Image: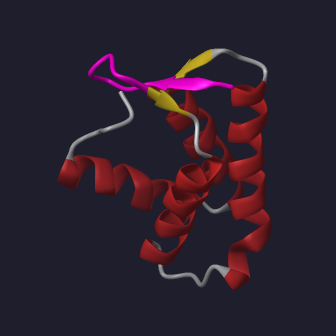
Amino acid sequence: MTDVIKSTGKKEPFKPEKVRKSVENAVTDAGFTVTSKMDAIEHASQDAMNIARDKTEISTKELRDEIVNDLEGDVPQAAQSWRNYEKQHGNKWK
């Protein structure tokens, strides 16, 4: 089981559904439907799960960087939406 280390230092169990929901939110905030960008959602979510699976601990920053990098290649508007969200609400993925 992988623990995620939050920016506060708090640890919590890795939850793939939280990652997937964050990716879906970035896609929809960028003006796309989840259905239309399912491949990109799967790609980013699966990559995050793959890097987390092989570790006992992973930082939110490492997860965030992997997700945004994948989105940048697949749906640049969603990557920008992610960064805009961070600017507005603070970067919880530090």
Q: Quadrant of the N terminus?
A: top right
The main secondary structure of the magenta stretch is loop
| Residue name at image x 72 percent, y 39 percent | 49
Q: Is residue 57 left or right of residue 42?
A: left
Q: Tell me which corner region of the image, top left, top right, bottom left or bottom right, holds residue 82.
A: bottom left
Q: Tell me which corner region of the image, top left, top right, bottom left or bottom right, holds residue 29.
A: bottom left
> Is 5 a magenta residue?
yes
Closer to us: 47 or 72: 47
| Residue name at image x 80 percent, y 67 percent | 39
Image position of 3 with respect to 92: above or below: above
Residue 9 at x, y percent in the picture:
32, 16
Query: What colour scheme does the image use?
Result: secondary structure
Residue 62 at x, y percent in the picture:
55, 25
Q: Quadrant of the C terminus?
A: top left
Q: Is residue 32 left or right of residue 40?
A: left
| Residue name at image x 39 percent, y 34 percent | 93
> Is 87 a magenta residue?
no
Q: Is residue 83 left or right of residue 26?
A: left
> Which residue range is magenta in the image?
1-11
| Residue name at image x 75 percent, y 72 percent | 38
Residue 65 at x, y percent in the picture:
54, 33
